[in-house]
Amino acid sequence: MRNAETARSASGDRARIGRIGHWPVRWHHALLTLWTAAWFFVAERHGAVSWHYLKTGEELLFSQVPGGGLALYANHPELQIGPVSFLVAGLFAPYPAAVGENLAEAFMSGLGLYMLVLIGRAAADHNLGTGLNHRRLQQRVLVAGAAFIPMWVEVSVRFAHLDDVLALFFTTFAVRALVRGNAVAVGVFLALAMDSKPWAVGFLPLLLVLPRPALLRSAAWAAGLVAAAWLPFYLTHMDTLAAARFTIPNQSASSLRWFGVDDPDTPWWDRPAQMALGIGLGGLAVLRRRWAAVVLLAADARIVLDPSVYTYYNASVLLGTLIWDSIGQRRLVPWVSWIALISLYGSALLVPSDSARGLIRLAFAVGSAAYVLWWPQRPPRNKRRGREAEDPRPFPGPAAREHPSPAAFEPPPSAAEHGGAAGIPTFRRTPVPVARTTRVHLPGARSTTRCRPHGFISPARPPHGLARADR
């Protein structure tokens, strides 16, 4: 019972870190909300640049307009937007045009704030049992989030690209589900991301983090939902295939120019190369046990091979750096996020030369990919002290780590509930904390003995030397 009370107390202390008094709001979330509001009012005056694409697509798809319905993509290949995005855009259709735009902008800005909460929780869950300092994690999310918000407002308010917003939002949910060990949810959210914006296919390597049985189940859900969303358009109108060959101008600031691609429009090989490069780099990250870099690497592949240079593209990069700075590394200062903001957004505002801006984008993409893939990482605190992790995890998440809840420290109420014979006590093989005694010598006083928690063991198989340690 004492162990259960200790666990409940530690859990409660962790839940109260950073809160504003007794309110269920943390200081770093409040500051990020104010930061978002400031950027929102700056961008809203000239916002919703591309909202008309969502309105047009929603009307064509659901209002029985000639040339719409399942013939939408065959007749309007310029609408490179997934059907889920049009479905969500329909939520704002009943309102007057100006009111609907403002509501959509506020809605998308709120999604960005919630994504910061999700990533902070995912980082805390991923680092359970590693000696993580939760206050430092909150500071890291605050600083990285301050770099993320300007680019999020760019995509959600200034350009109002609901399709990109939903793709990144669902991808964040997929990361959260991955950390929690929910394989089905990972596949569902990745499918929704691809159903919102096709380029989200670059995030599929997140599935490779799962163990094989869970991987197959998750991939089946992803494939089924993607087919359900897109196949009706292709099966009823074969001209929909032409939408995949839609081209945009090859701008002079594109990094493609540095590869010698001077075509006026998108090369035929460009989109497949983007997807292949993003998936390949993400697979390499998973192979090197750096799955937190998957989103950043897919975004790098997108900006380095895209013929256009719109600033809202950088939102996917800043989401990738936010995930990496929060989950992939343990340094207090998330300098990768700020380097991304200064390099990509700062160069777009301050560098007049198109060629120089293209070179900066290329240099950032190559440098950040090399860093997250090969730069040596600082191990968790428990490994720096010479201790191995208690339970090697096949994939991230507290479920794989089997981190116990407070109720897990208490014995079962009856054996019958756990399959044992009546009256015969059986015990769950649930990890319980072990107390290691430490002798503390104080000058001028007798030595005292203090207990401190040390890892988790299974009660059915005590570790070697336990009796000596507790002696």
Image (cartoon, rainbow, N blue to C red):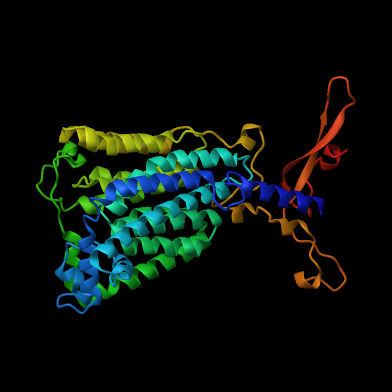
Residue 304 image offset from top left, x and y in percent: 25, 42
**Quarter of the view holding residue 257:** top left
Residue farthest to the left? Answer: 264
Image point 14% across, 38% down: which residue? 260
The answer to whether 150 appears left or right of 451 in the picture is left
Q: Quadrant of the N terminus?
A: bottom right
Residue farthest to the right? Answer: 446
The answer to whether 411 appears left or right of 191 in the picture is right
Residue farthest to the top? Answer: 444
Image point 48% across, 32% down: which residue? 376
Q: How many marks?
A: 0
Residue 299 image offset from top left, x and y in percent: 33, 47
Toward the viewer: 26 or 329?
Answer: 26
Residue 327 image offset from top left, x and y in percent: 50, 44
Image point 40% across, 65% down: which residue? 222
The answer to whether 76 appears left or right of 448 in the picture is left
The answer to whether 76 appears left or right of 372 in the picture is left
Vertical placement of residue 131 versus 159, above or below: above
Vertical placement of residue 400 versus 232, above or below: above
The answer, for residue 289, to whether it is visible in the render is no
**Quarter of the view holding residue 407:** bottom right
Residue 453 image offset from top left, x and y in percent: 74, 42
**Quarter of the view holding residue 337:** top left
Image point 30% across, 59% down: which residue? 102
Q: Quadrant of the C terminus?
A: top right
The answer, for residue 288, to whether it is visible in the render is yes
